[in-house]
Image: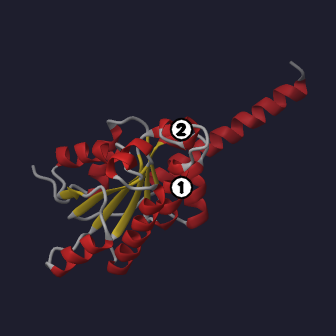
Amino acid sequence: MSRLLRSMTGIVSILILLAITQDHLQAQEVDIQAEVPVVLSSCGQSPGPAYVKVFLRRLGVEHEELKQATAQDLIDRQEAGSPVKTLIIVCGASLKGMGAAGISIQEELERTAALIEEAKKQGILIVGAHVEGMDRRAQGAAEGDNTDEQSIDAVCPRADLLLVKSAGNEDRRFTIISDNSGIPLLLYEKNMDLSSVLEKLFGMAGVAR
């Protein structure tokens, strides 16, 4: 290997290390406190919300799963005197899931846009989550299917916080959104790490001990 090639390889390695370090710094510097009650929803009807629900339930965080939550759901809770404090929208489109629900990706995007608009109006913390890694991203989808990427674009740039499994950020998709929009990014490595991330995010608020 020539000296020039070795130098170039070293530079590339340093750049990769710096990118990874920056991602982890973003994850460590997040200083947002989520509150209960929580509404857990979906943009794309993938199985993702079920993963998050497992850990919310395990931690005892007060929440309700509404995979097709609407703006009216938030309004109803506000008028009932129990306003939603945190809205977690899990990105990730499943053609099978949307088919079973009898909805199209366009209907999902329109519902999600109205949901986010109402959440912002009420001052609700919006967490945009992607928890299924690259398997759920467009690279692993059927040829020509970019619905997962559409769901990401519908939620993440408008969220207050991004919660992402690192495996789904291999192309730095969420890091770029975070940088461009100034949105804090929480990355975690393994599925089980999601529990400690949520525990820290909620500061044990609403947790039964």
Question: Is residue 181 shown left or right of residue 1?
Answer: left
> Which residue type carries mark 2?
Ala
**Type of amino acid under label 1:** Gln
Mark 2 vs 1, N-terminal side: 2
Q: Nearer the viewer, residue 101 or 66?
A: 101
User: Few, some or many C-alpha atoms within 10 Å of disc 2 (few <14, some 14-19, many ≥20)?
Assistant: some
Residue 138 versus residue 203: which sits nearer the camera?
138
Residue 2 on image: x %, y %: 90, 21
Residue lying at the far left of the rendered structure = 209
Residue at point 70%, 38% (across, down): 14
Q: Is residue 79 left or right of residue 188?
A: left
User: What is the x, y in percent for residue 130?
Assistant: 43, 48
Q: On screen, 78 above or below 91?
A: below
Extreme residue toward the top, this view = 1
Q: Residues within 10 Å of mark 1 (few under 14, many from 20)?
A: many
162 relative to 9, above or below: below
Task: Between residue 46 and residue 57, name the one nearer to us.
Answer: 46
Residue at 51% over, 46% down: 24
Mark 2 → mark 1, Cα distance in angstroms: 13 Å
Residue located beneath label 2 in the image = 141
Residue 8, picture quadrant = top right
Identify the disc placed on residue 150: 1
